[in-house]
Image (cartoon, helix red, strand yellow):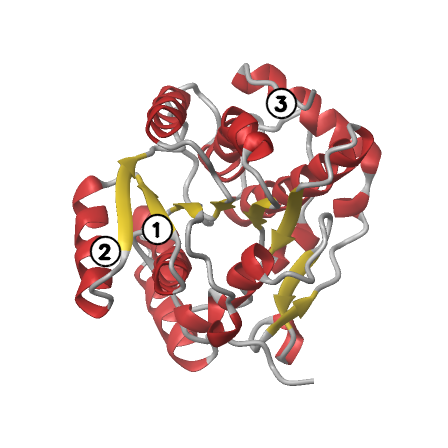
């Protein structure tokens, strides 16, 4: 069987795709490939300046790229609601929601609503966004997908429901691992609820990019003021990481490969699942635990004030 590449993304003409964190890294590379295959890509970015620069770069390579830029700050649920309202008012359909944006291993900070930043951005912001856009995904003719980006680090994760916000004890990588575990618990629980509701034309898929060289690795060391960590991250990216374009392949596969089923998990197939072409991946047992997922779902609804309208 030949290896799956960006050239295998099918024709997406007439489809609308939302990519969070579209201005850099794997989100940028995925946006570019979606546009190259004919989709209209809505680039959901916290910084409009960086989003404008990213759009200009894509258009310099793809004259016919169909792109929109809409502000989205996942660290502020008010921004999430504004984005969903604006998108729903402007667009009549949504074929793919790619929940990609995230923060990694940063010193403890809080979102606008007082959530620990990694849990708030990586999970709660995307949970709320998915819930608010779900009616549009459900009502769009044909198959639609919600793709949620996790990480191999989720295998380290534990859901500490007694201290979800890291107020009693906070460790940067532990908080990141918890947020990435939450991503998969959400993706798989959504699949179970779609099945129970008889909704078979909306899919929920989890994915991870492996180890891709992006700016994500640099924010934590910079904000903690650790020059050794920053230098180590730069060396590791240069020596061990695959390119952002390769890291985007599992996202593209999860979003556009026709054979991918709801409830799947996709990642690189190469060395230690950190690099290579995409295919089926194996999540941790904790990620597949339905009881933990149900509890997280209930907590997420309570914290964000959002509900999925599955009926």
Residues 54 and 171: in front is 54
Which of the two labelled residues, at mark 3 and mark 1, occupies the earlier sequence position?
Answer: 1
Residues 270 and 88: in front is 88
Q: Residue at x 28, y 49 (%)?
A: 67
Snapshot quadrant of residue 164: top right
Picture quarter with the C terminus:
top right
Q: Position of residue 201 (x, y in %)?
A: 67, 41
Picture quarter with the N terminus:
bottom right
Is disc 3 in contact with disc 2, using a CB cutoff of under 8 Å? Answer: no
Is disc 2 in contact with disc 1, using a CB cutoff of under 8 Å? Answer: yes
**Mark 3 crowdedness (10 Å alpha carbons): few <14, some 14-19, many ≥20:** some
**Mark 2 crowdedness (10 Å alpha carbons): few <14, some 14-19, many ≥20:** many
Q: From what the image shows, is residue 191 above or below residue 255? A: above
Q: Which residue is mark 3?
A: 308
Is disc 3 in contact with disc 1, using a CB cutoff of under 8 Å? Answer: no
Q: Position of residue 217 (x, y in %)?
A: 40, 59
Q: Is residue 310 left or right of residue 195?
A: left
Tell me, for residue 142, which label it has, or none: none
Q: Residue at x 46, y 57 (%)?
A: 12
**Mark 1 crowdedness (10 Å alpha carbons): few <14, some 14-19, many ≥20:** many
Q: Is residue 139 visible?
A: yes
Q: Is residue 156 left or right of residue 144?
A: right
SS category of the residue bearing label 1: loop
Q: Which residue is mark 1?
A: 22
Q: Is residue 124 visible?
A: no
Which of the two labelled residues, at mark 3 and mark 2, occupies the earlier sequence position?
Answer: 2
- In the current view of this chain or complex, which residue is farthest to the bottom? 2
Q: Which residue is mark 2?
A: 54
Residues 52 and 302: in front is 52
> Mark 3 to mark 1: distance in Å?
24 Å
């Amino acid at each position: 069987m030949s290896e799956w590449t960006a050239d295998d993304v099918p024709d997406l003409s007439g489809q609308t795709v939302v990519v969070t964190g579209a201005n850099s890294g794997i989100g940028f590379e995925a946006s570019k490939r979606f546009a190259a295959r004919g989709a209209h890509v809505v680039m959901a970015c916290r910084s409009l300046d960086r989003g404008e620069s990213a759009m200009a770069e894509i258009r310099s390579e793809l004259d016919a790229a169909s792109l929109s830029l809409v502000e989205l700050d996942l660290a502020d649920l008010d921004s999430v609601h504004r984005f969903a309202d604006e998108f729903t008012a402007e667009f009549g359909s949504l074929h793919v929601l790619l929940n990609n944006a995230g923060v990694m291993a940063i010193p403890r900070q809080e979102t606008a609503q007082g959530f620990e930043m990694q849990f708030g951005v990586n999970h709660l912001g995307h949970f709320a966004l998915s819930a608010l856009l779900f009616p549009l995904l459900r009502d769009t003719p044909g198959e639609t997908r919600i793709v949620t980006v996790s990480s191999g680090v989720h295998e380290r994760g534990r859901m500490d429901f007694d201290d979800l916000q890291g107020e009693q004890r906070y460790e940067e990588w532990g908080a990141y691992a918890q947020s990435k575990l939450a991503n998969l618990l959400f993706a798989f629980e959504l699949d179970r609820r779609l099945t129970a509701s008889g909704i078979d034309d909306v899919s929920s898929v989890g994915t991870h990019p492996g180890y891709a060289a992006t700016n994500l690795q640099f924010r934590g060391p910079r904000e903690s003021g650790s020059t050794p960590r920053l230098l180590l991250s730069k060396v590791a990216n240069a020596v061990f990481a695959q390119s952002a374009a390769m890291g985007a392949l599992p996202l593209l596969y999860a979003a556009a490969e026709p054979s991918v089923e709801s409830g799947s998990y996709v990642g690189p197939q190469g060395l230690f699942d950190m690099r290579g072409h995409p295919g089926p991946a194996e999540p941790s047992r904790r990620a597949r635990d339905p009881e933990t997922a149900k509890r997280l779902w209930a907590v997420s609804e309570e914290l964000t004030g959002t509900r999925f309208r599955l009926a």
